[in-house]
Amino acid sequence: MRRFSKKSYAAVSDINMTPLLDLAWVLLVIFIITTTAMVQGIELKLPEATPHETEMESNTPTISVKKGGDIYMDEEKIKLGELEKLIRDLKAAKGGKLPLVLRGDSGVEYKHVVAVLDILQRIPVEELAIATKPINEP
């Protein structure tokens, strides 16, 4: 009969990293998916128009005008007076060509959107897309 020493039955002191790495990958995928969904911007009820698609890059800066007249540059709330300097700086950083997307809530007073358009015309911004919802969408 063969005898075994107690050393061969000792507890393993190493940590198995495979389950931890699997968990890290799953969390990373969840983070990427939720972050992509959050990039859609400020929630607005866009006005309806006939469908006309314009190709814009996904990282195009967006100006949103909410129903109460609040103005957002991407996700950051800004004042109307700060908008011109901010867009001029962005345009200079991009080399003079700055495409923009203007999103206005369908219930916003027209004067707020006109004030933003006035600033964009003074800068000037040549590539401007105004976001709308197609008429046939519910």
Image: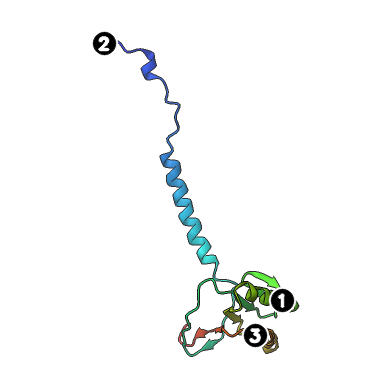
Disc 3 marks a residue whose amino acid type is Pro
Q: CA distance from mark 1 to mark 2?
A: 85 Å
Q: Residue at x 66, y 74 (%)?
A: 72
Q: Residue at x 26, y 10 (%)?
A: 2
Q: Residue at x 75, y 78 (%)?
A: 81
Judged left or right of residue 21, residue 122 is right
Mark 1 neighbour density, 10 Å: few (under 14) some (14–19) many (20 or more): few
Q: Which mark is residue 124?
A: 3
Q: Residue at x 35, y 12 (%)?
A: 5
Q: Which mark is residue 85?
A: 1
Q: Which mark is residue 131?
A: none
Disc 1 marks a residue whose amino acid type is Lys
Q: Residue furthest left?
A: 1
Compare marks 3 and 1 and give the one earlier in the sequence.
1
Q: Nearer the viewer, mark 1 or mark 2?
A: 1
Mark 3 neighbour density, 10 Å: few (under 14) some (14–19) many (20 or more): some
Asked if the residue under mark 2 is in contact with the one under mark 1, i.e. CB atoms within 8 Å, the reply is no
Q: Position of residue 47 (x, y in %)?
A: 56, 86
Q: Residue furthest right?
A: 81
Front position in the image: 15 or 56? 56
Front position in the image: 76 or 70? 76
Disc 2 marks a residue whose amino acid type is Arg
Compare marks 3 and 2 and give the one earlier in the sequence.
2
Q: Which mark is residue 2?
A: 2
Q: Position of residue 62 (x, y in %)?
A: 59, 76
Compare marks 1 and 2 and give the one earlier in the sequence.
2
Mark 3 element type: loop
